[in-house]
Image (cartoon, grey):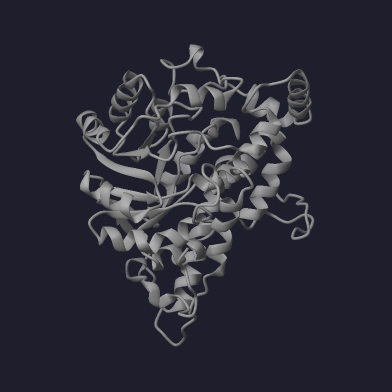
Amino acid sequence: MGHMSLAGPHHSLNLAPASYEDYREIARRRLPRQIFDYIDGGSFDESTLAANRADLQRLQLRQRVLRDVSGIHLATTVMGEQLELPLILAPVGFGGMFARRAEVDAARSAERAGISFCESTLSICSIEEVAAASTRPLWFQLYIMKDRGYAEDLMARAQAARCTTLVLTVDLAVVGRRHRDVRNGISGRISRVNRIRRGLDIARHPRWVREVALGGRPLTFGNLERALPDARVPGDFQGWVASQFDPSVTWGDLEWLRSHWSGKIALKGILDPDDARLAVANGADAVIVSNHGGRQLDDVPSTISALPAIADAVGGSCDVLIDGGIRSGLDVVKALALGARACLVGRSWAFAVAARGEDGVDHLLRNFREDMLVTLGLTGVTDVNRIDASVLATNLDVTP
């Protein structure tokens, strides 16, 4: 794609993207506003969305010197699965609306980087299409609908597609109030004025229309053929989610889940130590400390501040993963220092694929690797599996 012009106070002209913020800015320019805001936004006043970043940035590292860091080891295992980096590409709904066949691109990039890609229930590309593009086994993220037959069908399809891990999202009993989505008409009643605004917004992005909306296969939810007529994206998407997703799911349903899934199970959306203990008691192989990227309940703790107590609560009885605000390899090191086994990133790959497609995700993952090599080298650590709280400055309080 060559060099790009970036806008904003922190961007000079004619610079190639070098960071998350660069990719975010390119994506902002390329995507219709309603789609960019869907990725970028959070719930209510977006306080938790901001806290995810602010609390990570507040953590400081201890720089150590005169240590032999000529060989640095970044590989680890999660639920027995080898990863070349302690990183997983998180499930992102609507992914294929950010770039043409975006989930396929991201899965290929993940395979080249030696890490896992997690397919979303609400992906545009089907689990079969994504699995066919990658020889590395995928993870699959599941939402449970009121008709349990949908979930059973999805689990069967995921297992047939060689998925090794089922990620059950547990923090969507009700849909968060996302003000940006209401303003843009993605949720709530779509007025005539909003329809016109949405149409004009899309018309101002002809490249997106040409490459994504009209670029090959139609924009349908590839995993929801049974749940939606023609699997079309509903006009009032949030309303459809609220009417279809099952708010009655409880801990007791994990036994039903296990009866239909033979692989590993991770619970995504854990913020409380008591829930982490219940996850272990109910047979979870991993918990993912997550507040849905700040997109569900606002004014809850940031994930990095919730992490230490949850890691302590499970005491090594299952793997602890984290998402929310992870933008660089520097952030990954901080999360590992506070008890995470690995990190999931969602917005990062969404913006990278929107900006530069598969090449963008490749470059993003190389950046994570280089960030980690630098961070470990300058903190005097040679193995990610030996990172602990000693790499952090000791004068900072990370509790919520």
Q: Write the residue at 24% across / 38% down.
A: 263
Residue at the bottom extreme of this rendering: 66
Residue 191 horizontal/vertical position (percent): 73, 20
The foreground one among 331 and 339 is 339
* Depicted 4 relative to depicted 332: above or below: above
The quadrant the N terminus occupies is top right
Q: Is residue 152 toward the left or the right of residue 119 in the image?
A: left
The foreground one among 273 and 38 is 273
Residue 354 horizontal/vertical position (percent): 62, 40
Q: Is residue 343 toward the left or the right of residue 25 in the image?
A: left
Q: Write the residue at 63% across / 25% down.
A: 188
* Depicted 99 relative to depicted 203: above or below: below
Q: Write the residue at 48% across / 22% down.
A: 243
Q: Quadrant of residue 129?
A: top left
Q: Is residue 219 toward the left or the right of residue 309 in the image?
A: right
Q: Is residue 75 visible?
A: no
Q: Is residue 115 toward the left or the right of residue 93 in the image?
A: left
Q: Write the residue at 50% across / 58% down.
A: 368
The foreground one among 151 and 374 is 151
Residue 300 horizontal/vertical position (percent): 50, 52
Q: How many marks?
A: 0
Residue 100 horizontal/vertical position (percent): 58, 30
Q: Quadrant of residue 50?
A: bottom right
